[in-house]
Image (tube, grey):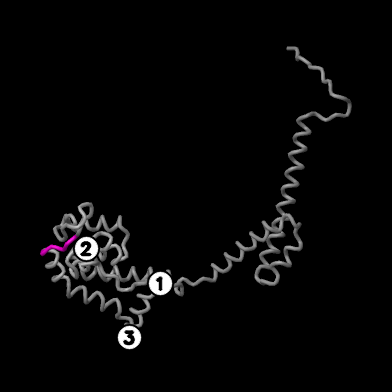
Amino acid sequence: MQRTHYNDKRQPGTAPASRSIRLGVVLGGVWALARAALLEIRVDRVTAAIRSSAGREEIFECFPVADRTSWRSRANRVASKQNLGDLDLSETPGHLLRRCQQRSQEIFKEVLGEFGLTQQQTALLLTLARCSTASIQDLSDSTGTDRNTMGDITSRLIRRGLVVRRRAPRDARAYELRITTKGLRMLGRMAPGLAKVQQRILEPLGESERDVFIRMARSIARIDSVEPSS
């Protein structure tokens, strides 16, 4: 079988195109590895220097002016990671407040779980028990609950017959909420348990610390005794 030969019209001494491409790929790879190694060295230098605030700016003298902004940003990220690594969650207020809330929910469920109410639902009933009527906005302000969540809570209580909703006499577009006799009886049965829950939450604190804790917690929550209009 005869093989077909094609004329190679390349100039003498010229490498095949495929060979040139391969050579370019190899050289590109070598450059990429060299650049990566250089960057790794720079990252190591930045990481070492970042431990000293005085050395942060000194190290950037090694970089071209055009690159200093990006490397300064990288150094800030390194410093941030270092600070977060030293962060003790047991000393952060946000984490502690969440853990306190978690502990409060555990105690509430243990003591009052048989009634089938959540802490938010109970707070709404207690608020309504202290006034004749209240709007959704009033309840949102006094309990610190957003309107959408409050709407869901009230709907559940209405279905259980613990709360009724009616048109506001002064504004036909608005609704007012009122606790029912059944709701008041429910709170009456829950009263001993509610007192026990508060006692157990504060149990780890000494007598003199409890008032201080309540005062500080109110300050952090920015509670100014907001009461719904009656």
Q: Residue at x 75, y 30 (%)?
A: 18
Residue at the farthest right position: 12
Q: Residue at x 73, y 39 (%)?
A: 25
Question: Closest to the observer: 123 or 24?
Answer: 123
Q: How far apart in space, not on screen, are marks 3 and 2 (Cα)?
A: 37 Å
Residue 123 x %, y %: 24, 67
Q: Nearer the viewer, mark 3 or mark 2?
A: 2
Q: Quadrant of the N terminus?
A: top right
Q: Is residue 36 above or below residue 178?
A: above
Q: Are marks 3 and 2 in contact (CB under 8 Å)?
A: no
Q: Is residue 208 above or below residue 37?
A: below
What label does residue 206 carry, if any? Answer: 3
Q: Residue at x 37, y 72 (%)?
A: 222
Start and end of the magenta stretch? 177-181
Binning the other alpha carbons within 10 Å of mark 1 as few (below 14), some (14 to 19) or many (20 upward) gives: few
Of the residues shown, which amino acid type is indicated by label 3?
Gly
| Mark earlier in primary sequence (3, 2) | 2
SS at mark 1? helix
Q: How far apart in space, not on screen, are marks 1 and 2 (Cα)?
A: 33 Å
Q: Nearer the viewer, mark 1 or mark 2?
A: 2
Give the residue at mark 2.
134
